[in-house]
Amino acid sequence: MSAPATTTNAPQIDVNGCTRISLTGVVCVIAIVTLGLGVQISHGFLNSRALLAVTASIAFCIAALVVPRATLLIPFYTPASLRRSFFLFLVAYFIGGIVFLRIHHRPIDVLIIENDSANTFLHGVDPYGRNVTHQDIYAPEQRMYGPGIEANGRVRVGFQYPPLTIFWILPGYLLGDVRYSFLAAVVLTGLMIFYCEPNLNGLISTILLLLLPNTLFVLSYGWTEPLILMTLAATVLVAKRAPGWVPVALGLFFASKQYSVLAAPLAVLLMPKFSWRDYFLLLSKAGAVAAIVTLPFLAWDPRGFWWSLVTFHSLAPFRKDALSWSAALVAHGLPPIPQWCVALVIIAVTGLVLWKVPPAISTFPIAVAMVFLFFFVLNKQAFVNYYFFCFGALCLGVASDACGAGCDFILVRYKPDDHVRSPK
């Protein structure tokens, strides 16, 4: 139902104060719930129902990007009291998260490597150095590492993640647990998601992120995805509130995880008006920020840095328990999907997004979630932490969605005796 024209002496509803519930946002919520339930079924390990749920969430992501840009305006406001209550909720969540982490201690190599690397760096030693090793807590038959990496109960690898992660975990390490830093990242992400759209959209998105059971599961194992999600949230928030800082936030996003560079072509969606000059300027500035954080460690020990950050991961064995179609094929006696095929799919999907999806800040995190879901569900390793990042990106898509790049039509919910001012 189209909004009627303005009547001079009649009361008006301020459309700008209403909450916009878009069809894109609704489909995103369905994708979030589907993905969350799917991963919860198996905690991120191979399971036929979970794999079908992940695949269905990809379909919903595609639908969210191509559905008509229809929006329902509802009279839901966010008074200051609600914002204060939300802030108190985040504080309570942080305190509760600390209690949870003090109780739950997970035996995993990620935490050993993070603690060793933080300690090494604080003592002035290169955490990526070729002589750095860590305790191997797994039995030989588990085959967690590639050939030549484990010897005499030690893992021959430095820090497995980009240098930005080292800086981020230091406060948590000094406070007694590196996982505190990732808990802070999740809370800050929730805060940024809410302030992307401080209304019903932001509230629902933040609650979905924080109360998903897999969020605490990811935190308990010390996986680093909360950091990459936080930098993605910062990129979306500054794109809405302070566009001049987008290169800085985007650069930190690129510096937070090896696979984050897959989102570089999608940065086009953050630009209100595309031009090759502006696009290359954006990527150049973002690349410079990432280089400032990363290159000092590369210069410290280039061979050790490349071994820990690239070669170690390329030698990682195929995981038959991964929540991916490759693992499902192997489980049925078929060969896994080759890496060149995965690359072709990612290139094709990214190209279709850039061709068909109109540029808008809200479509950027949705497109990131979809491309990365394709990447994970086809690859040789895919577990709960990877899908957690996609889940959080979709929450960002819901929160930042405000009619996308314009809307085809608007539905306004109002009383029969009200007169509504049409939005400009």
Image (spheres, grey):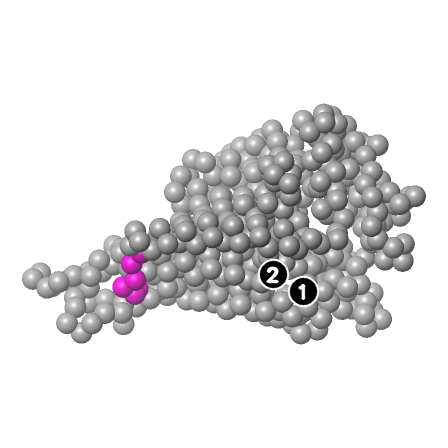
Relative depth, front residue between 203 and 73: 203
User: In the picture provided, is 332 more to the left or to the right than 104?
Assistant: right
Please say if the residues under marks 1 and 2 sit with CB atoms less than 8 Å apart. yes
Q: CA distance from mark 1 to mark 2?
A: 8 Å
Quarter of the image where the C terminus is located: bottom left
Q: In the image, is residue 373 part of the stretch drawn in magenta?
A: no
Query: Secondary structure under badge 2?
Result: helix
User: Which circle's residue, 1 or 2, is located before the other in the chain?
Assistant: 1
- Dot label at residue 214: 2
Which residue lies at the image location 77% right of the left edge and 37% below the top edge?
158
What's under tag 2, amino acid-wise? Asn
Dominant secondary structure of the residues highlighted in magenta in the image: loop
Relative depth, front residue between 151 and 38: 151
What segment carries the magenta color?
73-78
Which residue lies at the image location 72% right of the left edge and 25% below the top edge?
124
Give percent across and percent down for residue 350.
59, 54
Which residue lies at the image location 40% right of the left edge and 54% below the top edge?
86
Q: Residues within 10 Å of mark 1 (few under 14, many from 20)?
A: many
- Return the residue at label 1: 43
What's under tag 1, amino acid-wise? His
Query: Secondary structure under badge 1?
Result: loop
> In this rendering, is residue 85 above or below 37?
above
User: In the picture provided, is 8 more to the left or to the right than 72?
Assistant: left
